[in-house]
Image (tube, rainbow, N blue to C red):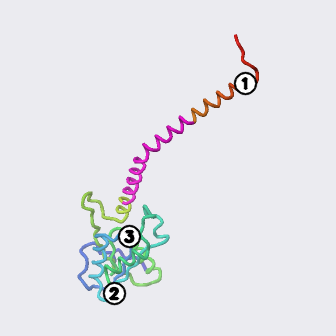
């Protein structure tokens, strides 16, 4: 069975309650307006149930700032709280929907109709609203705070280093003086 391009709906989304079940997936990190729109569209399309897959593990391997991604439990909790129970896709997850249809075709199963929901743009830049952008902002804020702390400590550290350098120079002069006295005592004072 071949994957049919007509399984992808590029125009307006179908009317409410068009499908018995709706399936969608994503990372859902820092649940934002784009996620909410995606989930709301899925919920509106479903008559009976909605199934949401929340990515974790190897599926997060290529994400930017992976160390800042919320735990799977927190992300699942946030999604569940937003919708209490489609195959809707946004433009970013469309390849995943196509992949599901390919696997279904390989198993001689019927194709899912894929609804495409437009991405939400971030207000100030016009770029797509994304969890990656939110993690990037969080990372930049943390770095800025760290630099501020370093800048506050820097004058104190510089003064401390200067005192240590002077102490070392004084110790070196005293050592040279002691060595010189020792040599003079050993060999006697020479006069020209």
Q: Position of residue 131 (x, y in %)?
A: 36, 65
On whether residue 66 falls in the magenta region, the answer is no
Left or right? Give the position of 103 relative to 112. right
Residue on which disc 3 sits: 29
Q: Nearer the viewer, mark 1 or mark 3?
A: 1
Question: Mark 2, residues whose alpha carbon is within 10 Å: few (<14), some, or many (≥20)?
Answer: some
Of mark 1 and mark 2, the one earlier in the sequence is 2
Q: Nearer the viewer, residue 172 or 184?
A: 184
Disc 2: which residue: 49
Which of the image's four quarters has the C terminus?
Answer: top right
**Residue appearing at x 32%, y 88% in the figure:** 20
Q: Position of residue 167 (x, y in %)?
A: 55, 36
Query: Which of the two residues, 62 or 169, is positioned nearer the viewer here?
Result: 169
Q: Which residue occupies 35% across, 61% down?
A: 133
The magenta stretch is: 138-167
Dot placed on the residue nearer the N-terminal end, 1 or 3: 3
Q: Quadrant of the N terminus?
A: bottom left
N-terminal-most mark, 3 or 2: 3
In magenta stretch: residue 150: yes
Q: Is label 3 in a helix, a strand or a loop?
A: loop
Would you call the spot at circle 1 few (<14 residues within 10 Å), some (14-19), or many (20 or more)?
A: few
Quarter where residue 76 is shown: bottom left
| Viewer-side residue, 73 vs 113 | 73
What separation in Å lies between label 3 and label 2 (alpha carbons)?
Answer: 22 Å
Query: How many numbered discs sit on the rendered protein?
Result: 3
Q: Is residue 189 above or below residue 145?
A: above
Neighbours of disc 3 within 10 Å: few (<14), some (14-19), many (20+): many
């Amino acid at each position: 069975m071949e994957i049919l391009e007509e399984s992808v709906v590029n125009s307006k989304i179908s009317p409410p309650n068009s499908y018995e079940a709706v399936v969608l997936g994503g990372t859902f990190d820092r649940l934002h307006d784009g996620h909410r729109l995606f989930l709301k569209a899925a919920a509106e399309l479903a008559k009976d149930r909605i199934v949401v897959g929340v990515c974790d593990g190897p599926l997060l391997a290529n994400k930017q700032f992976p160390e800042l991604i919320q735990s799977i439990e927190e992300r699942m909790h946030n999604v569940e709280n937003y919708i209490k129970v489609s195959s809707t896709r946004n433009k970013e997850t469309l390849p995943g929907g196509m992949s599901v249809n390919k696997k279904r075709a390989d198993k001689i199963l019927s194709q899912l109709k894929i609804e495409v929901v437009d991405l939400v743009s971030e207000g100030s830049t016009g770029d797509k609203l994304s969890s990656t952008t939110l993690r990037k902002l969080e990372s930049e804020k943390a770095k800025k705070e760290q630099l501020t702390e370093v800048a506050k400590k820097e004058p104190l550290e510089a003064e401390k280093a200067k005192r240590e350098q002077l102490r070392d120079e004084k110790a070196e002069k005293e050592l040279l003086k002691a060595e010189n006295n020792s040599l003079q005592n050993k060999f006697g004072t020479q006069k020209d």
